[in-house]
């Protein structure tokens, strides 16, 4: 499939604890936005519905930006 990114991979370094490796893995997953992608692909949105959601997010961002400028 095109557009699939490789999974996050963390190799255990010499003398490194499992907790530290797990912390590095979580940080890597967070920086690569893997969780966001999984949530986006967890259910299907029709193209019209996707457009409405996108427009709603844009309205929300603009309201938040206007509120920040007002303060």
Image (cartoon, helix red, strand yellow):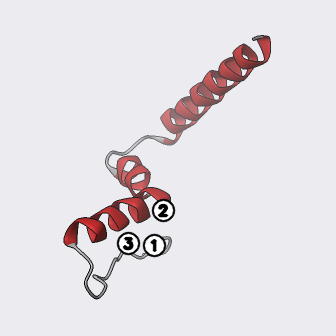
Outermost right residue:
69
Tag 2 residue: 32
Residue 62 picture quarter:
top right
Tag 3 residue: 8
Distance of mark 3 from mark 1, alpha carbons? 9 Å
Q: Nearer the viewer, residue 8 or 47?
A: 8
Q: Nearer the viewer, residue 36 or 53?
A: 36
* Residue 14 placement (x, y as % from top left): 28, 88
Q: Quadrant of the N terminus?
A: bottom left
Tag 1 residue: 5
Identify the element where label 3 is drawn.
Answer: loop
Earlier sequence position, callout 3 versus callout 2: 3
Task: Look at the picture and state if 4 lies above or below 26.
Answer: below
- Tag 2 near tag 1, CB within 8 Å: yes
* Residue 3 placement (x, y as % from top left): 50, 70
Identify the element where label 1 is drawn.
Answer: loop
* Residue 67 placement (x, y as % from top left): 70, 14
């Amino acid at each position: 499939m095109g557009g699939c990114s490789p999974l996050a991979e963390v190799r255990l370094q010499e003398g490194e604890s499992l907790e530290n490796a797990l912390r590095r893995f979580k940080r890597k997953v967070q920086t690569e936005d893997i969780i966001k992608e999984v949530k986006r692909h967890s259910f299907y949105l029709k193209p019209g519905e996707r457009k409405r959601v996108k427009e709603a997010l844009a309205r929300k961002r603009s309201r938040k930006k206007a509120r920040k400028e007002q303060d």
